[in-house]
Image (cartoon, grey):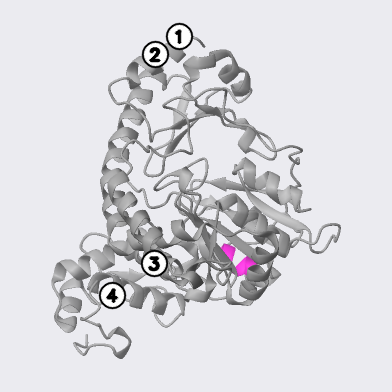
Amino acid sequence: MTTMQPPWLELDRQAGDLEGQIYRALRERILDGQLSAGQRLPSTRQMATVLAVSRSTVVDAYDRLRAEGYIEAQTGSATRVATLSSSPWVQSGPSREPTALPQLSPAGDGMFRPGTPDVSDFPHAAWGRCLAARARSLRIHDLSYDDPCGIRALKEAVLEHAAASRGVIANTDQVLILPSTRSGIDLLARLMIKAGDSKNDVAWMEEASYPSAQWLLKEAGARLFAIPCDEAGIDVSRADAHSPRLIYVTPSHQYPTGVTMSLPRRLALLERARETGALIVEDDYDSEFQYGSRPIAALQGIDRGDVVAYLGTFAKILAPGLRVAYAIVPTHLVAEASLEMQRRGLAVPIHIQAALADFIREGRLRAYLRQMNARYAERMQTMVSTLKRQCCDWLDIAEGQGGLQLATWFHERDFDDVALVSRLGPAAQGLQPMSPFYLSAPRPGLLFGIARVDVARVRTAIIAFKQRL
């Protein structure tokens, strides 16, 4: 085997993150077909020698590629490029359609309410300093209407964060700053869906899926078709034959089930979107929180057809009250999306944008995420272990590998989970039934939020609602 450094793996040592550079270079070659299925890769020791880096750096890059399905190896055998295949095309039926904006959360609040982060440890002092500094320093032109899609400083900071943490690849002009993920879904739906046009009004959605996204797409005039998900994510081989204009997915941490879409499924989804001319809306709502392994890279980062619009939010990772989210859209949609944002007045206050840009650039977001990831991991583990001890006789419990909620399902497929949550009242502590997340035949269960769990009170709370069954 040659010991010459391949020309496509030139490391920029000044830029740092050598592991990431090796990972991305190999990933790009695999996706482009320049490293073919079954091809043997150099051992970690050989690669480290050739690149003049530590072996641990190469091991970490290989581990990341292996975790995402690009390479495979067994103990004692060579590391080889994995076979990336897609599935055949078959049909399934249309979904039932939502008729009103879903109201999932029961009255009141509680530590099991999903979809909301713990804001008790929000870095008020650091955020206050950033906000106060920008309130004093913004110039006249900064306060104008010149940047309806977001100030450049925040766009650049967002792109740096998304590239480093999620593997997103884009330029600054593709970033749109929005007040919420919902506004992003609505914006993209109204750009893509042509209401009343049978050839251009179809949207595919994961089954199960985010009820607010269902409603927003329906309001935009879409005909919704539910595409089944399993432990490997959305399966487009089981999709309806109707060609979609838009495909809504949460591939890195499926909402609400928590599964991660496999690499073969991701490639099949991208291929289907390219074939049909559809836009994939990738809602990456809380993938920064991953327990036990590093986050899987975003679908957008492996998109070769400019078919993915990536949505991120600071509502889940910082605080909902900031009212800041973002979309990274394909280049061909930038002008149209920007114009639509101007027409609809979707701007975020300039002082908030400028302060958030500083907060990210100073490394405060990264430090806060690291702190909260450790805390959420402990709370998730507490929830999983407690539920398995107390409820495994009647609930199937997800693994809880990431995110801010934990999905469970009743063994009895005809169980009325909506009635149960209503009957529990305050004892439900904010948990939600799973049935409303389904467009077609519902699977009953319970969705527990973990972000605000008090580990000292979990067992008592679980026993309390268990006794009300």
Which residue lies under the disc numbered 2?
A: 463
Q: Main secondary structure of the magenta part?
A: helix
Disc 3 residue type? Ala
Disc number at residue 467? 1
- The first of marks 1 and 4 along the sequence is 4
Q: Secondary structure at mark 1?
A: loop
Give the x, y percent position of residue 271. Answer: 60, 69
Q: CA–CA distance between discs 1 and 3?
A: 49 Å
Q: Which residue occupies 27% across, 67% down?
A: 62
User: Was residue 272 drawn as part of the magenta stretch in this picture?
Assistant: yes
For the record, the magenta segment spans 268-273
- The first of marks 2 and 3 along the sequence is 3
Which residue lies under the disc numbered 4?
A: 22
Give the x, y percent position of residue 469. Answer: 52, 11
Q: CA–CA distance between discs 2 and 4?
A: 49 Å
Name the front one of labels 1 and 3: 3
Left or right for 233, reference 9: right
Which residue lies under the disc numbered 3?
A: 157
Q: Is residue 31 above or below residue 342?
A: below
Left or right for 88, reference 461: right
Q: Nearer the viewer, residue 103 or 57?
A: 103
Name the front one of labels 2 and 3: 3
- The first of marks 2 and 4 along the sequence is 4
